[in-house]
Image (spheres, grey):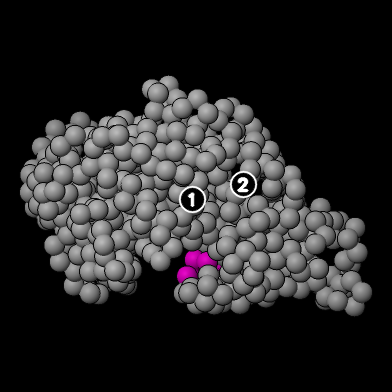
Amino acid sequence: MQKKAVLLLICLVLTAAIVTGCSKKSDPSQTQPAKQLQRGGQLTYGTLQEPNTLNPLLSDLMATAEVGRLVFSGLITSDDKGQWMPDLAAEVPTLQNGGVSADGLTVTYKLRSGVTWHDGIPFSAEDVRFTWNVIMNGQNKVVSQEGYNFITAIEIPDSQTVIVRFKEYYAPYLTLFSTILPKHKLEGTPDLNKDSFNRMPIGTGPFKFKEWRIAESITFEANGAYFLGRPALDTILYKIIPDTNILLTQLKSGDIDLVTNIVPAQLEQFKAIANVKTMITPSMVWEHLDFNLDNTLFQDVRVRQAIQLGIDRQALVAASLRNVASVALTDQPPFSWAYNGNVKSIGRDVNAAKELLSQAGWLPGIDGICAKDGRKLTFTLVTTNGNKMREAVAQQLAQQLKDIGILLQVQYVDVPGFFADVLKNRRFEAAMYAWVAGIDPENSRLWHSKYIPGRANGFDGQNYSGWRNPEMDKLTEQGRMTVDMEQRKQIYYRMQEVIVQEVPVIPLYYRATIDVVKNNIANYRPNPTPAGNFWNAWQWGFIK
């Protein structure tokens, strides 16, 4: 999955509430005595995935991003409501406070004073400029240069001031510099990709790296000099357990304190454990079905629209996801400021779907499957293997589409091959996978025709459908460069309308995340934004 991020002057408001369900708890209507947070102790965090590096700039794995929030800081971050908040910067730069110029081409960050790296060396503006140079160095295998490549210069008039100058307005400027690297540790390194720093990093975050036992655990200890105050915990043990059944067992036995990203099929098992609470949080991960628009079958929009009408998304959510998800209509989550609430919900309509297919010349045969010019209406849906939930959804889709006269065949591919070959080289008729939306709605890499991966552009971009729409190209360019927020909102509203009308992809559902936390843990607040669940780990602790 890919990620997009954040925005100017506007905060994401999560109108969908966090739902909590607890097992074996007292009546919540009873008044509970105040409980005190104790200092110290070790929290054990159970996870299915191990990082491949501890340098967030070099990996798009969720595990790397998670632990990265413990070790590193960025200039700006976001809280669990999607509101921008300063991190290493003293305040969030905006037009109103003078941090952003009227034309949007200059952004000024005033840095916090007194911040030090884990080895005691003072943090300064030099580290920010150094990080930009690292990202723009083509020899470094960073995840993305998107946004940073719009910067023409970074000026540092003094150690506490960073002036970022852009060649053109870049609306999601606050998404940049989410991780700052130490110049004094990495300057002059011959190969950042292989540097030992990536396994033993130092940052300015709330916890210091202590030890990494491969395939077992990573230990982090409290940073007593953290600029927001010493963490309540002494250590966090990031325990790697690549089996949900073992996670369940260890949570029951008390060997772990917190488990995240539980699959819906196991929700009831985890809720049945004594002295824990389950937290279900709306997320920005949206599952979707892509069409390869170079395939002649999908070049008739009526066929794509018929498939959309043949899918019962609410039934998918209920059966395969146990209702731990919400129906997706567009590429923007319902709690985003850019979500177009006027987009008409498209429910299942078998008769209307059949009528569209008939208009396109596809008529049902004796076996109920439509045919045209001797060709049956059948195609293959490629998706990832090993994901039981996704496999169940794929089988449901096959049954639903059979009802309208389409034969859907499902093919499963391993995850690395799916993303590195099937999608990148567009070797599919239809594909099903997920994207991670961002606080900022900027999605040009998904929709602009210049981002159709191929030899001409060095396989750059994620417009895997191969959608070529002049209006959409223009809208994505306008959305990224428009300073006025109301005008920008209207641009994204229109983009969502075009997506629903043209159906280059079919959004299926937005996942929710399920976390299971012991009742004696305080201040754990799941965060669906790119800041991740460790965004306030310095505040976590045990209740006396």
Report the disc number at residue 149: 1
Q: Where 127 sits versus 114, above or below?
A: below
Please name the residue that numbered disc 2 is placed on: 330
* Disc 2 from disc 1: Cα separation: 28 Å
Q: Residue 14 at what x, y percent from top left?
A: 44, 37
What residue lies at 49% left-to-right and 66% top-to-bottom?
389
Q: Which amino acid does label 2 sit on?
A: Thr
Q: Residue 263 at what x, y percent from top left?
A: 41, 62
Say whether residue 499 is visible: yes
Q: Where 20 sits versus 261, above or below?
A: above
Quarter of image, res 198: bottom left
Q: Main secondary structure of the magenta part?
A: helix
Q: Residue 531 at what x, y percent from top left?
A: 35, 47
Magenta part of the protein: which range? 387-392
User: 306 or 423: nearer the eye?
Assistant: 423
Q: Which residue lies furthest to the top in this view?
A: 96
Left or right of 150 in this view: 503: right
